[in-house]
Amino acid sequence: MANPQVDEDSWTTFEKLLLIQSVYKHGDNYLAISRTLKHHPMVSHTPDFFTVKNCANKYNSLVDPLKNEAEIEDEHKKRSGEYVNVSKLLTDKQRMPWTAKLARQLYHERIVELKSDIKLTEKKFR
């Protein structure tokens, strides 16, 4: 059997959005997340692509940059003196949840894709 773990860039915006929504719904239960993606009628990959490992790896690759941004932002605020008291730094729980932040970003990307598809389709029928 071929290795279903292919290039991470092959995930579509819709699949990434579905992944993030599934993480929001199921937490870190990647077995349930994997099943959700495998059985969704609109994914472009075969079901064997959405393994527990692939789903977890993709989620981590999406959320890690956001975590790094938050750490850099906090460090910058500490150095600039914006925070007089270090205890005033936002905790992960006080920040917008990573899944919500990613969902918002991916939702906007998906809207742009759909608008582009609509324009292309309209051109075909003119």
Image: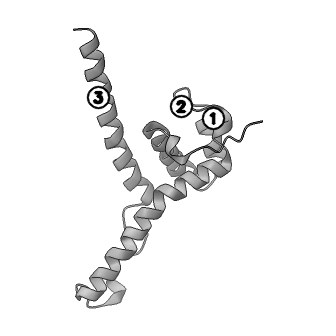
Q: Earlier in the sequence, mark 1 or mark 3?
A: 1
Q: Is residue 55 left or right of residue 71?
A: right
Q: Residue 35: percent from the left, percent from the top?
A: 65, 39
> Residue visible at 49% across and 45% down?
9
> Residue visible at 31% across and 35% down?
111
The quarter of the displayed image where residue 83 is located: bottom left
Q: Amino acid at mark 1?
A: Lys
Secondary structure, mark 3, is: helix
Secondary structure, mark 2, is: loop
Residues under numbered marks 1 and 2 in contact, where contact means CB atoms less than 8 Å apart: yes
Disc 2/disc 3 C-alpha distance (Å): 19 Å
Secondary structure, mark 1, is: helix
Q: Which residue is mark 1?
A: 38
Residue 102 visible in the shown view: yes
Q: Amino acid at mark 3?
A: Ser
Q: Which residue is mark 2?
A: 43
Q: Amino acid at mark 2?
A: Val
Disc 1/disc 2 C-alpha distance (Å): 8 Å
Snapshot colouring: one colour
> Residue visible at 50% across and 39% down?
15
Q: Earlier in the sequence, mark 1 or mark 2?
A: 1
Q: Which residue is mark 3?
A: 116
Q: Residue 68: percent from the left, percent from the top?
A: 42, 70
